Image: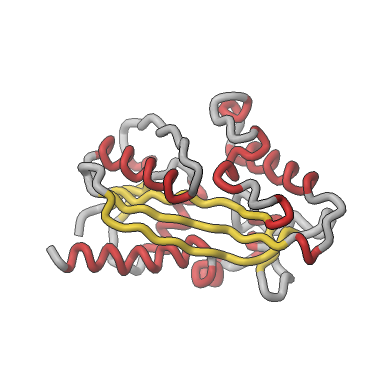
Amino acid sequence: MPTIVLATQNPGKINELQSLLKDSGIDVIGLDGFDQSFPEPDESGDTFLENATIKAIAYAKATSMHCLADDSGLIIDALNGKPGVISSHYAFDGDVEGQAASMTRQERDDRNCERVMLELTGITDERRTARFTCTMVFADPTGAVLASSEGLFEGRIGQDGEVPRGENGFGYDPLFLVAPHFENTSAEMETTEKNKISHRAKAVQSMIREIESIFSNK
């Protein structure tokens, strides 16, 4: 089985994916494992699947390696599905080239969380239901898509003063109270616990089976 490139430059996501895949027998490296940098493709899709496909194809061709890409984000029911596909740059309306480009990832995360909390001001707990979603796409070195998978992680966004909480996460994790008890945020969960039930964990588990099937038939 070949070494697979994880098509992300997000260190938090690389660590999480490597942890999820460590017992699978699949060897992976992040884009930070290369001696060169790669231009980020324009994630112009309207869906998580479209954007994950764009990234998988672009980085598979750029690295000439099998590539696993994911597109993930937060869907909040009271905000009609926002932040959605622009979750990572929500505070900047999805603009990755403007002000956000000069910020650290933590600074962008903080601004995104601030916008979400502001837009949910006055919204009751019952209407703050939300879910993280993760869509993964696996492509070969020619850019041919071989498989895709999806996972969901249900919860709700806590009230101002109740959140943010927790250090074991990134993005919106400190705001996200995990269903069904809504007692702890995703950022307060132990890694081993999160790796059993998170959106990314579910997508990875499905993808592992897909990858094993692909290479067992070769």
Which quadrant is the C terminus positioned in?
Answer: bottom left
Q: Which residue lies furthest to the bottom in this view?
A: 181
Q: How many marks?
A: 0
Nearer the observer, 180 or 186: 180
- Where residue 17 appears, as percent x and y from the top left, is 43, 57
Query: Residue at position x 31%, y 53% from top?
Result: 138
Q: In this view, does 118 lie to the left or right of 134?
A: right
Using residue 167 as the reference point, say whether residue 64 is left or right of it.
left
Q: In this rendering, is residue 111 above or below 131?
A: above
Left or right side of 162 for 129: left
Q: In the image, residue 82 lies at what x, y percent? A: 65, 48
Q: Which of 208 and 82 is in front in this view?
A: 82
Judging from the image, the colouring scheme is: secondary structure
Vertically, is 86 above or below 213? Answer: above
Residue found at the very far left of the displayed protein? 218
Q: Give x and y (percent) for residue 30.
A: 37, 46
Residue positioned 68% across, 75% down in the render: 180
Q: Which residue is drawn at 83% across and 61% down?
A: 124
Q: In which quarter of the image is the N terminus?
A: bottom left
Q: Which of 76 and 160 is in front in this view?
A: 76
Q: In this view, does 180 lie to the left or right of 53?
A: right
Identify the residue shown where x is 55% and y is 72%: 193
Q: Quadrant of residue 39?
A: top left
